[in-house]
Amino acid sequence: MATNEEQTRWIVHGERLIYDNRWIRLGLVDVAIPDGERFEHHVVHLDRAAIAVVVDDQNRVLLMWRHRFLADRWGWELPGGLIDAGEDAMATAAREVEEETGYRPKEIEHLITYQPMAGMVDSEHNLFLVRGAELVGKPTGEIEADLIEWVPMSEIPDMIARGDIWTSGTLIGLYAARDRLNGVSA
């Protein structure tokens, strides 16, 4: 279905910063919608993130069992983290895998980039597929996970159905990796 972008595009007249720190920036954006109505819209800006789907030659994926205090919920997640200023997203993914799991990635390729909550939150997520990893030590830094395990890809659908995998980066990463590994292009 063809659309005329000029008729459907919101016009941004400016942004006023309300709150700013290392982790989050909250702003009010002065926007006009296509019918001409103008108002302030809350927006949240977060740093970009990199997430890695690490698979081995036995068709297993490296997952971390974590508690997320905000939702007060446990679940299996992929390793990942925020991209430091000036750092390449792929380098971040590799660094986070090693820091969080103790495994050093062998081969890494870009899978997909997405926005998990477009409309109010700007938080670009970059997903990578890692083929093979070598255990080089224990995880470093903060304790990121209670368990780190290699899980057969065949178990992933049941884990999702049970709600053991529920975060957007992990869900999207696992689906994108499954397709790439099965030769389906995005």
Image: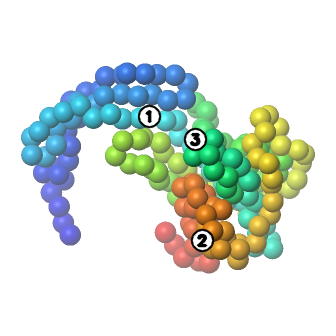
Q: Nearer the viewer, mark 2 or mark 1?
A: 2
- Which of the two discs, 3 and 1, labels the residue nearer the N terminus? 1
Q: What residue type is labelled 2?
A: Ala
Name the one closer to the observer, 181 or 121: 121
Q: Distance between the residues labelled 2 and 3?
A: 22 Å
152 up-or-down from 102: above or below = below
Residue 132 position within the rendered picture, expressed as x and y whole percent measured from the top left:
78, 62
Res 161 label: 2
Q: Residue at x 55, y 29 (%)?
A: 23
Evaluate if marks 2 and 3 touch, with contact meaning CB atoms under 8 Å apart.
no
- Left or right: 120 in relation to 110: left
Q: What residue type is labelled 3?
A: Leu
146 up-or-down from 29: above or below = below
In the figure, residue 106 lies in which quadrant?
Answer: bottom right
**Residue marked by disc 1:** 45
Residue 156 position within the rendered picture, expressed as x and y whole percent measured from the top left:
67, 71
Q: Residue at x 20, y 69 (%)?
A: 1
Q: Which residue is drawn at 81% across and 59% down?
A: 149
Evaluate if marks 2 and 1 touch, with contact meaning CB atoms under 8 Å apart.
no
Q: Distance between the residues labelled 2 and 1?
A: 31 Å
- Which of the two discs, 2 and 3, labels the residue nearer the N terminus? 3
**Residue marked by disc 3:** 70
- Left or right: 162 in relation to 43: right
